Amino acid sequence: MRLAALAGAVLTTVALSATTANATPPSGVTGTIISKTTAGGKDYILREITLAAGGTTGWHHHEGTLYALVRSGTLTHNKADCSIDGIYEPGSVFVEPAGQSNIHVGRNLGKTPVVLDVLYVLPEGAPLSVDEPNPGCDFQ
């Protein structure tokens, strides 16, 4: 019985490590939470996100919906099929839908920082994002 439990623990650790190793972490991204409130089983989090020139959010999805406003810079947004689903300039507003079927990446291909104001509407206690592996695109 102990051997089976140990084998299960080892397999779980290996599986989790493989998932983590394949994730595409953000690069050149900083974020500051401006406010957070919880109501009706949802977390409402207002966050300022900055992507440095050449920065990327890494591939990820969200467990809730995000609403974003571009304050400065130009954000290039790609879907998991590698297509560009938006190029957002200052004053642009966009929405990122919830769920693993909405894997995406945001990239700053410009020379100036991208600054976003983002409202996360997440299930209470959910992470801000869930890292995902690159779906096979030639870029990060």
Image (tube, grey):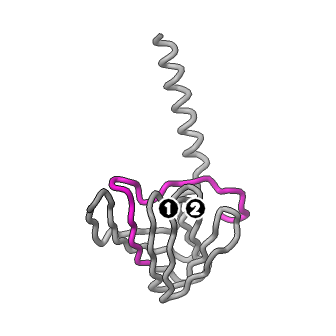
- Horizontal and vertical percent position of residue 28: 51, 68
- Horizontal and vertical percent position of residue 102: 58, 61
- Horizontal and vertical percent position of residue 88: 56, 82
Task: Using the image, determine if residue 17 lies above or below residue 38.
Answer: above
Q: Residues within 10 Å of mark 1 (few under 14, many from 20)?
A: some
**Amino acid under label 1?**
Ala
Q: Marks 1 and 2, Cα distance to the nearest angstrom?
A: 7 Å
For residue 122, the mark is: none
At mark 1, the secondary structure is loop
Magenta stretch: dominant SS?
Answer: loop
Chain part drawn in magenta: 116-140
Task: Using the image, determine if residue 52 lies above or below residue 74.
Answer: above
**Residue visible at 59% across and 64% down in the picture:** 104
**Residue visible at 46% across and 12% down in the picture:** 2
**What residue is pinned by disc 1?**
98
**What residue is pinned by disc 2?**
102
